[in-house]
Every structure is written in structure tokens, then in C-alpha cells.
Image (spheres, helix red, strand yellow):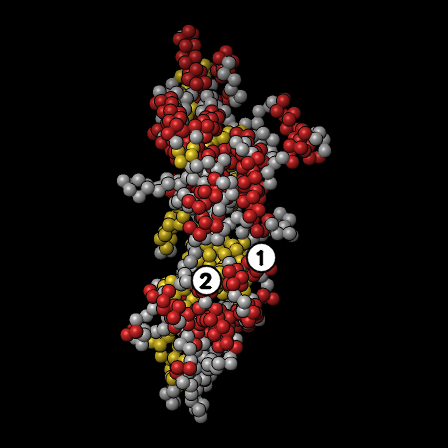
Amino acid sequence: MDGRGRGGRGGRGRGRAGGRGRGAGDDQEPEAIPPSWPVYFPRLRFAEDDRRAELVAVLARFFSSEIGFELIKGVRTHHLRDVLVALDFTQLKARADIPDLFAALELAPPEAMLCLRAAIHEVVFNSPVGRRELPHMQIPAPAVKLCRPPVVDVHLVNHPEARVTFRDLRSTLAGKIVTLRGQAVRVSPASYLAKTLQFTCDRCDTPQTFYFTNGLYDEPESCAAPGCRSKKFTPDRDSVKCADWQRIKLQELIEDVMEDDDYDGRGQARFADIEAEGTLVNKCAPGDEITVVGIVEMRNVEQKGSALERERAASQFELVVNALSVTRQRAGDDVNRQPLSKEAEEAFRRGLPNLAAEDAHFGREPAMSPADLEFIVRFTEECDGEQFKQLVHSLCPVIYGQELVKAGIVLALFGGVSKKFEDDGWIPTRGSINCLVVGDPGMGKSQMLTAASKVANKGMYCCGGSGVSVAGLTAAVIKDPTTGQFTYEAGALVRSHGGVCCVDEFDKMQSEHDAFLETMEQQEVSIAKAGIVCTLPARASIIAAANPNGGQYNRSLNITDNLNMSPALLSRFDLIFILVDDADATLDEHRARHVLAPHGVGGVAQLKQAQQQLLAHLMRKYITYARAYCFPMLSEEAGKILQDYYVEIRARCAAGADSVPITPRQMEALIRLAEARAKVELRETVTAEDAHDAVEIMKEGMRDVLKPGGTLRGKGGKLKKSGKAKMFIDAMKRKAQDKDSAYFTTGELYALVDDLQLQIPDVDAFIDNLNMAGEILKSGRLWKVA
């Protein structure tokens, strides 16, 4: 018996009747029984007037027709012996006028699925149309009696009528078909579930086949032979028939939680247990977004422990969704994606993307509705050439200004193009853009990260501190409570695969920084714990926000000392922005008006400006489309511009100018930024304007990072003097020669800073930094040049 048959779940109690009754073919002519009947209904006697037999006959006639055969002609072999076919419920309902089928799917889904499988089995293996159209599926005549009959498994997909939310998953849905969409956070190792076992009576040696319910081992209550009252049996272990089995822990998507009508900002994502059997095993991995169509069942809670605990658990039940299909969603994953098909490309150039052709090419469901496509076309036409400006203006409008930081975050949301070259020894290059925002408190960093996670095609937000661990970021190895085997549960970075992971308070999680090194460059998470050695994909953009040490950014120190981060980690960020809260009368006045505008105190200008902003869910649709269907190629002109800028900053670094070490990672970052800039306007080629914008954004971001006033450590930890530090040391040397003394008081150092007009806000920290770097030495209360 196949694992997906659920012969023991079709309304026959605990399956004990199967041990007493005789086979379906007893007292009947063999030719009168359809070949598929004993395969899918082994415990039922065949009768032509049986409702199941009548439904199987009607379905077999429908699938034998030309319009019905189109639905099942994609049948294929799975693992050499099992046969599966994906059956689209929407198309089935539109083409098949069989009220009994849809009534059975509504009232008795397990029984209806068995009838569907039996009918498709008859059409594929025992009908003229199946032998003619599917010759590769037929079993040779000499092998028919040597091997077991093939078993057809039906994956029921695209059932929008049964769509329910995790909140609505209640006991009233037991026995009904539901459609759930969520993210797999834990997938247990594949195990084997016992379905049938043959027992032999110890008194009369009468064999009988016993069917297990939900894989739980049990024995027959009485012998099947007439007149025998024995209750002792010997199991024949070699006759056991098993099915592959797996349990999936499904979590509700964050966007579904926020779209809940009762969401008040404190909603918590709910979970559901999914059981997959047979050909549905290993269809997904932790971190995948999946859509599950299945039957809701109620199971007793298994409790181990004392007798009192087991007695309490006897009255407790849990809801489990027995999967009929598991479909992975890949709308947000742009890794190794090929260009659009010719049909989709022609439709795109006409102004309306043809997602149906593209989705058919990749074998996935469309993620866009006609209204979404209409908005994308209208937005592209109305904001022709101004899409980037509109998106930057619409990201986190509650924060005034910070256009440069918002522009960098928008480019990180779109991302570049991932490339994988299999020839000539090339290695894959990442397309995700990592961004770091460093600044004083109150600059709006957290709000911008929260807004980015809401408009991202697949966003995850987490805040650093005591509530974050390495296992929570990467993956946790746990012991599965059902099977007792060790498995892993996906963390934030793995669950952000194909999207964006926003990490706030990045400086508060210094012990977890090593977990980001592999993910930010190799785009994967490696696990080697408890005998589990595997690599999980984590191709996600990381947008982090951090506060400097001491609460405020110290301009006399470099960014490494301000954050206590390793250079290896900082080099993996494509963009680094530094926000300093300087007093500016004009800027402060505009910020005050912006804050007062929602309270009706700043005039109507701010309110009109707010009305022109793009809504968050519309931004998410536009970003999702661009990441999934737009893959711009770098032009020669754009490449020359990026190359010239890289050579320029590389020469400055080699000449000992005031700059951090420049590596080829900066060149790759420039390419990704230019590709993301072209994605914003859905272009297929990166133009010179895109390259100029990428150069300007990186130049503006690096300007604050490389601003003179501190010391920067180069390769090997050797200290490199910045402009102000070099001027100060040279002035000390000249002053020492003039007064014939190498010693200076603290007051003389203050006077020297004023004479040079260095404009250092914290002179004490500047002097201490030079002392720690070994440029000046302290002797008692005096200072001298090293």
C-alpha cells in the first residue's frame, strides 16, 4: 500500500476491520474488478453501484477525453516506481462538470482523493489514450506479474477557494481541505511510517493484514478465521510496508500578520504542523516560502512521563495538516535566473509584462495580480525617468531628509544581478548589496530599517542585544520532538534568503559579528553540529544600523574604533553612511516643521507632499517585480566609468592619501550599485547615467568615512596618519625645534590645535588617540613626540 493512500484514514475507525475482512476480489470475477480498485481500496469489496466505483468511472471517462487528458498529461515517474501528477484545482473546476467530485472534495476529501488517483491510474495504464499518448509510462507485459502495480499520487495545487489564514485554522476545519501559505522554519529528517503489517494467529496460523492508523503500531483484537477466538499473534516483520514521512513546521508570513484586520502592532506569527508523505517528502527546506494544500486532521497529543501526565494528554488534541501538495514560492529569489522568454520580453516592451509565459518557463505560480501589473505599467509611464526619486521620497517619509541614506537603502532593496560562471574557473559573485548606517541617536536609523523591511519583497527585521544569538541568526540544531532525531531550524539570515535582513543595534551584538562574515560574502550558512554537516543558502542583503561608542560619533577616531568592528566585517559592506547630529539652524527649522506637520501646525505644503508618496505595499510589488524579472547587463561605457573611479581611489590609497585600503570588493560593489540603479527603472542595460549615480552615492558615503580628523589602520595593523593628525605632529616637531625642548604641556597642545585651526570637537580624545597609536608619548604631566 502506498504511503499517500491513507487507506486507514478513510472513515474506517482504527483500521481493525481490515484485519477481519477478506480481500476485495473474493467471490468476484477477477475481470469484473478494475485493476486500480485493490490498489487504492484494498479493504473495500468492489460493487458497481458503490458511490466510489461510480465516481471513479465518471472521472475515468472525463480524463480520457481530450479536454480532461490535458490536465494529467504531465504525469511523470518519481524515484523509478512512484508516479505523480500535479492537478490544478482551478482548471479542473472550470473544465469538469462533475458535481459529485466537488461535493466529495468538500465533505470527504480523503475518499475523493482516492477516487481521483484510481481514475487517473485507469486512464494512464489501462486506457487506449494512455497507452497511445504516454508510452514511456507503460509497464512491459513480462514485468506486470513480477513487480507491484504502480501507484499514482495526485498533488492538488492552486486551490484558492480553500485559502485560510493561520488565525482561522481551528477544530471546525477538521476533515476539510485548506490552503496555507507560510515559511518553513523546521523540516524534520525523512523517516519511514509503517502502513501495513501481516500478523499470524498463534493458534490456527491464519494470516491477516493489519492497517496502522497514523503509523502507530497496534495488533489485531481477534483472529479473522471463523470460530477462532485467539488474541495472540506473531507479526511477520518482513511483510511490513512503509511510506516516507516528514513533518514541517510552518510559520505565518510577517506580511500576512500585518495585513490582519485585528493587527494592532503586537501580533505574533502563528505556526502550523504539516505532515508530508510519499512523493511530498523533501519538497522544501528551512527558510523556503511554501504553499501547502492539505486536509486538516485532529490527532491525540502524545505525552511521555508519569501516569498523571499521560492521563491529562489523553484529552488533548492537536491540529495537523496532511499535505496534498507542497509548492515552493520563488518570487523573491533572483539567483541564477535566466533572462525573460521571448514572449515575456515582447509583452514587456509593449508595456504590459506577460507573467504567465515567464512563470510557465520557470514552473511556478504567478505572484502578481492584473491590478499589480497595471500599477507597475502606470507607475513606469507616469514617472518615466523619475522612479528613483519617487521611491527615495516614499521610503520612510516620517524622517526628514537623509536622501543619501534612503537612496542607498533603496538600491539595497533592489540589489544587483547574481552571476555564476561554470567555465574557466570562475566563482559565483553575489548580487545582494550590504549597507551599514552609523550615527548618533535620534537620527531615524531604526525607522528607516523598519520601513525597509516592510517594503522589501521578503523582509526580516531583528534588533541586536540580549535577544539575539548566533543560532537565531544562522540556524539552530535541535532535537525533533516527533522523531527524536537532530535537525536544524532556520534563523533570520536563512529565512531572509532572496530578500533583505534588517539588523538594528548592530553594535550591541559584537559576539555575533562572526556569524555575518560567511553570509555577507559567500551568501550561505554552514552547519557542523551534532553530526549534521550541511550548507544552507542565505542570499540576502543585510542592512544594519549601529550607534558609535559613547553614544556619539567621535570625528577624531576612525570608524573601526568608533564601532569596535573588525576591518574584515566592515569591508563586506558595500555602502557605509555616517550620520552626525550637527547643529544647523536652517536644517533644524525644517525638521521642526516636518515633525509638526501631522499635528496640523506646519501648513499644507507638507501634507500635499505626503499625499504624493507611494504606499508601502505598492513599493513592495514594484521591488518584487524588478528583482524577479529585470537583469540588466553592464555596458562598455558604464564599465569604463566604474573602472576609472576604482583606479582613482586605488591610486589615492597606494599614494598614502587619507583613505582606507581599497580592495576589488569596492569594484564589485560599484557594479552592483549600477545594476541596482538600472533595475529601479526596469532597464535591460546599465547606462552611463546609472554608473555616474553609483559613483556619486559611493563617493558621498565614503566621504564621511574617509574625512580627515582621525587615524586609519591599514594592512597589517600599521597606523596611517590622517590629515589633521599629520598636521598636528609636524607642528609639534617644528615647535620643539624652535624652543629647543621636546616636551609640551596639555595647555600648549590645546594652543597648538587653535593655532592650526583644526576644528577638533574633542581635543582630549584626539590627544589620547595619538598616544595610543604611539605618535606622541606621555611623560608625567608632559607630552613629547615619539
Residue at the extreme top of the image, as rendered: 738
Residue at the extreme front of the image, as rendered: 66
**Looking at this view, is 681 or 784 the one in front?**
681
* Residue 674 visible in the snapshot: yes
Q: Which residue appears at 57% of the width and 39% of the height?
A: 378
**From the viewer's perspective, is 425 left or right of 45?**
left
Q: Position of residue 740 (x, y in %)?
A: 40, 8
Q: Which residue appears at 61% of the width and 24% of the height?
A: 587
In this view, 297 is above or below 224: above
**Which label belongs to residue 759?**
none
Question: Which numbered mark, 2 or 1, is in the foreground of this view?
Answer: 2
Crowd class of label 1 (few under 14; some 14 to 19; many from 20; radius 10 Å) = some
In this view, 230 is above or below 156: below
Crowd class of label 2 (few under 14; some 14 to 19; many from 20; radius 10 Å) = some
Q: CA distance from mark 2 to mark 1?
A: 28 Å
Q: Quadrant of residue 164?
A: bottom right
Which of the image's four quarters has the C terminus?
Answer: top left
Amino acid carrying label 2: it is Leu
**Looking at this view, is 484 or 225 the one in front?**
225
**Looking at this view, is 406 or 704 the one in front?**
406
**From the viewer's perspective, is 553 left or right of 610?**
left
**Which label belongs to residue 71?**
2
Which of the image's four quarters has the N terminus?
Answer: bottom left
Amino acid carrying label 1: it is Thr
Q: Position of residue 487 (x, y in %)?
A: 42, 57
Identify the residue position indicated by label 1 in the image.
165
Q: Which residue appears at 43% of the width and 18% of the height?
A: 723
